Image (tube, rainbow, N blue to C red):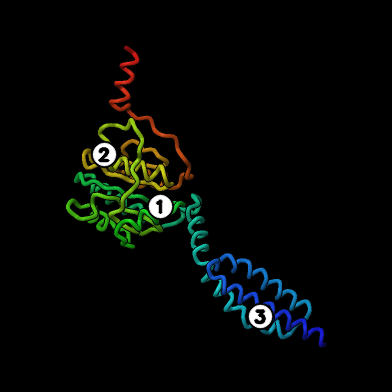
Amino acid sequence: MYRRMILEILLIFLALWASYRFLAGAGVFRGLFLLLLPGILLVAVAAEALRLETLQYLLDRAAIPISIGALLVLQPELRKAVARIGHMPILRRFLQPQSRVLGEIARAARNLAARRNGALIAIERTETLGDVAEGGTRLDAEITRETLETIFWPGTPLHDLGTVIREGRIAAAGCIFPLSERTGLPTEWGSRHRAALGMTEETDAVVLLVSEETGNIEIAVGGEIGKPVDPDALEASLREALEARPSAAAAPEHAPSDDASSETERRSA
């Protein structure tokens, strides 16, 4: 009788001491919580096996608060896990919200291209674009054709820079994308093309760009810019690019620069 009582007191003391240490180390809150949960489970098993009624009573009362606390503390990790699951190609085919989002983006791009209004849109995949979004104007807006066309309408403060799409919403506009430092690019390519290349060289994002000079719609992924996309096939092309496994693609073959051509001519001479 007394032995069981002493054991219960010791276990409760250890649990309180661990909780104190856990709260005192709030700087590593999530990591400690992950370590604390298995400890609570072990104590619960021990209490059940040894029939420690007082400890069982306390654990029963604390079960719901602990569960809610775990969900709150581990919310960022759970969101990342759900996001990664959502990026699986098999599941993406059944996600209707993404189909609506891609449809709105495609319709906006077609209209912008028809008017020769330039656009630059980065769609986040597994690697976060948070740093790029924070440098722009935060919107957290629903993706609609009208909103995207307004952002890229000439004369608006945000139209010359990039827009970031994350988690099915317009996270930010007026964002500065990293510029590619690659040499030997086609001379007709401007800053939007370099920004699209730079973004896809540093992240696994898919970037849609509309050229205001030619009205062409192009998709950049893995450090490559593909050929101009048929406007009617744009939605399907975007879906295909997003469903492809993120990987570092080889640099595309481009026309040599003027400097490279001159160097070749000198060597031939």
Q: CA distance from mark 3 to mark 2?
A: 64 Å
Amino acid type shown at disc 2: Gly
Amino acid type shown at disc 1: Glu
Q: Is residue 202 left or right of residue 38?
A: left
Of the numbered discs 1 and 3, the one sitting upstream in the chain is 3
The residue under the point 30% across, 25% down is 259
SS for tag 3?
helix
SS for tag 1?
loop
**Circles 1 and 2 in contact, beta carbons < 8 Å:** no
Q: Residue furthest left?
A: 155
Q: Position of residue 241 (x, y in %)?
A: 41, 44
The residue under the point 31% across, 54% down is 104
Q: CA distance from mark 1 to mark 2?
A: 23 Å
Disc on res. 215: none
Amino acid type shown at disc 3: Leu
Disc on res. 124: 1
SS for tag 2?
loop
> Which is more toward the observer, 229 or 66?
66
Label 2, residues with CA under 10 Å away: few <14, some 14-19, many ≥20? few
Q: Residue 186, located in which quarter of the rendered image? A: top left
The residue under the point 34% across, 54% down is 164
Of the numbered discs 1 and 2, the one sitting upstream in the chain is 1
Residue under label 2: 190
In the image, residue 205 sits, relative to residue 140, either above or below, namely above
Label 1, residues with CA under 10 Å away: few <14, some 14-19, many ≥20? many
Disc on res. 59: 3
Residue depth check, mark 1 versus mark 2: number of the one nearer the observer: 2
Q: CA distance from mark 1 to mark 3?
A: 42 Å
Q: Is residue 231 left or right of residue 42?
A: left
Q: Where's the N terminus, which quadrant?
A: bottom right
